[in-house]
Amino acid sequence: MDYYRNLPAEKDNENIDRPQVSVAVIHRLPRYFRYLRELIRNGRMRISSGELAEMMGVTASQIRQDLNCFGGFGQQGYGYNVNYLYAKISELLGVGAGLQAVIIGAGDLGRALVRSSMFEKRGVDIIAMFDVDSKLIHKEVGDVTIYDMVDLEQFCKEHQVDIAVLTLPKEFVEREASRLVECGVKGLWNFTGRELSYESDTVVVENVHLGDSLMSLNYALCRKLGEEETKKKSEERETQK
């Protein structure tokens, strides 16, 4: 069930109160979104900060501090109305804003992303893909058409494009990102592995490094395996005494 469809549409993003808060708080909002959506699926109508904290593995104080950045949304002695809190956080995250995106690069990652339900569940509509490979032009992935990169500017003139998902080879990303910004695209979700940044306040960039997450897992796994090996050797020495 796509709960965001029941949210009121944002007619003007400027009317939504999104105060300046820390990056850490912003990065926690999608976690609230996911957990609250699960609570709604399970028919839960109300939850306390303590119960939500236990589910999410944080403190109740942290939850209250985070939500107080946006006005609180809770009531002492009652807790949080799950549907209301979900709707407010969805609103803050732009789920009902009617955002539209294109994917630049129709390779394996681009095709995997367009087939994912992730965008639809978060209220983002993928309206096109772009590539330079003539063999791919005018083919479809799901119900999304692949267009030639030479048509990018014209397409952006004719359609509202809020977000560009960058899955092209990294050696071309700076050039194509500049084209997108010139076309008026305000959000860049960059999967290329090469950092992008813009001084302009009108462009928002999110650099995603999938390999970083894997290496963090590798570190934690190797540390755990090392601890287990050390413990095993210690036990062997004890049995030999």
Image (tube, helix red, strand yellow):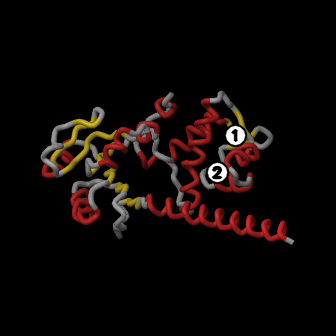
Which label belongs to residue 67? Answer: 2
Where 186 sits versus 112, above or below?
A: below
Q: In the figure, is residue 29 to the left or right of 57?
A: left
Question: What is the residue that sits farthest to the front in this orientation?
Answer: 240
Nearest the eye: 92 or 127: 127
Residue 143 coordinates in the image, percent (x, y):
28, 32
Which label belongs to residue 80? Answer: 1
Which residue: 66% across, 53% down? 68
Residue 5 coordinates in the image, percent (x, y):
46, 31
* Helix, strand or loop at mark 2: helix
Nearest the eye: 186 or 197: 197
**Residue type highlighted by circle 2:** Leu
Residue 229 coordinates in the image, percent (x, y):
69, 66
Nearest the eye: 133 or 220: 220
Q: Give the class, few, some or many, for how many residues have Cα within 10 Å of label 2's Cα (few <14, many ≥20).
A: some
Which residue: 73% across, 47% down? 54
**Residue type highlighted by circle 1:** Tyr
Where 139 sits versus 131, above or below?
A: above
* Helix, strand or loop at mark 1: strand
Kindly report the distance in space between the C-alpha atoms of the residues bearing marks 1 and 2.
Answer: 11 Å
Nearest the eye: 178 or 190: 190
Which residue: 80% across, 66% down? 235
Residue 198 visible within the image: yes
